[in-house]
Amino acid sequence: MTESTFLGSYSTSGGDGLDQADTDTATGTVALGARVSGVPDASWLAYSPDRSHLYTTNEDPTGTVTALRLDGPAPVVVNTRSTQGGSPTHLSVHPTGNYLLAANYDAGSVAVLPLNSDGSIGELTDLVTQTGGTGGDPHAHQILTDPSGRWILSVDLGTDSVYVYQLDTTTGKLVPHDQIVVAKGTGPRHLIFHPNAAHGYLVAEDASEVIAFGWDAASGTLIPGQIVGTLGPDPTTPNYPAEIAVSQDGRFVYVANRGDNSLATFSVGDGGASLTLLGTIPIGGDWPRHFALDPTESWFVVANQNSGTVTWLPRDANTGLPGPVAGSLDVPAVAMVLF
């Protein structure tokens, strides 16, 4: 069986921007398909709730996002809009399907853009520059909706903060609710929620750590908990973790280590409240910016930005552990994998 796959890459560094691919779930093999033209620097990708449209960041100093229609034999660009902030690194679609949320890294701002009935992106309805925290310049790195659909969370690497908002779905405005500040120099990058929706995990790019937290959806409150390193004791390699994921059964968490060029596996305990590092394994490339589990969770597919390769590793469903690299595909300046 093959799974349709999109690969985003940096066109300003020699990549195609956006490519179609197929992943064989029996062997893990990724086969490159057609290039999708008109989508530069597609460093992050997200589907609409019904998967009829794909949205991409265009991570360049001007700051734009692009909508594509997926109802034909090949994706078709619908339109592109400004996020009014440089280098958008992340976007997500609100569960209602009515708004696109984007994080502008250079500007340290988060943007809200309405989505029209035809899937096109409308003019921006809100732009919030994030402030406070530990005193660094803001660098918004992620924006997503919590599992309850009630709250919007933005992770800011520069201010060492996670901001919690409510979204007024009538006006498209963000209403500030809370700000959780972690230790200076932590450099939070991305967070994910456990399937039980009561816990989550925040990966820290600068500190090479994962922070486990509790999540109270009733009050919109994050409760920081255990902190665990992504390389084990006495690491010797400069390391900047990038992506984090949790298995569908909630038993394992995974982190891509840039620098160490490895995939870390954690077992989940205490109902989601604690993590134990089981080990790391080489990912077969340089600078793993992103990885994804295929829909069967039999394979890890890794986007190695600096080596310009996509690699794949098998996964043991019982132990949760990845096996050695099984194959590699050349994809220059690759940034993201989306099934």
Image (cartoon, rainbow, N blue to C red):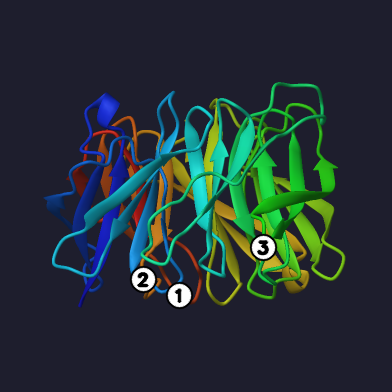
Query: Considering only order in the chain, which callout, 2 or 3, is on the residue closer to the N terminus?
Result: 3
Whether label 1 touches label 3, CB < 8 Å? no
Position of residue 12 in the picture relative to residue 218 (left or right): left
Which residue is at 79% across, 68% downward? 217
Closest to the camera, between mark 1 and mark 3, is 3
Q: Is residue 332 above or below residue 142?
A: above
Seen from the viewer's position, the closer of residues 173 and 315 is: 173
The amino acid on which the numbered mark 3 sits, given as a three-letter code, is Thr
How far is the residue under mark 1 from the one under mark 2? 7 Å
Name the element at disc 1: loop
Depth order, front residue of 100/79: 79
Residue denoted by label 1 = 317
**Label 2, residues with CA under 10 Å away: few <14, some 14-19, many ≥20:** some
Q: At numbered mark 3, what does the secondary structure look like: helix, strand or loop?
A: loop
Dot label at residue 298: 2
Q: Which residue appears at 75% of the width and 74% of the height? A: 271
| Image-quadrant location for residue 276 | bottom right
* Residue 170: image tag: 3
Residue ID at (75%, 45%):
163
Q: Earlier in the sequence, mark 1 or mark 2?
A: 2
Residue 39 x %, y %: 27, 41
Asked if marks 1 and 2 touch (Cβ < 8 Å), the reply is yes
Q: Position of residue 337 (x, y in %)?
A: 35, 53
Disc 1 from disc 3: Cα separation: 43 Å
Residue 264 in sight here: no
Percent x, y of residue 77? 25, 51
* Residue type at tag 2: Ser
Q: Residue at x 47, y 30 (%)?
A: 87
C-alpha gap between disc 3 and disc 2? 41 Å
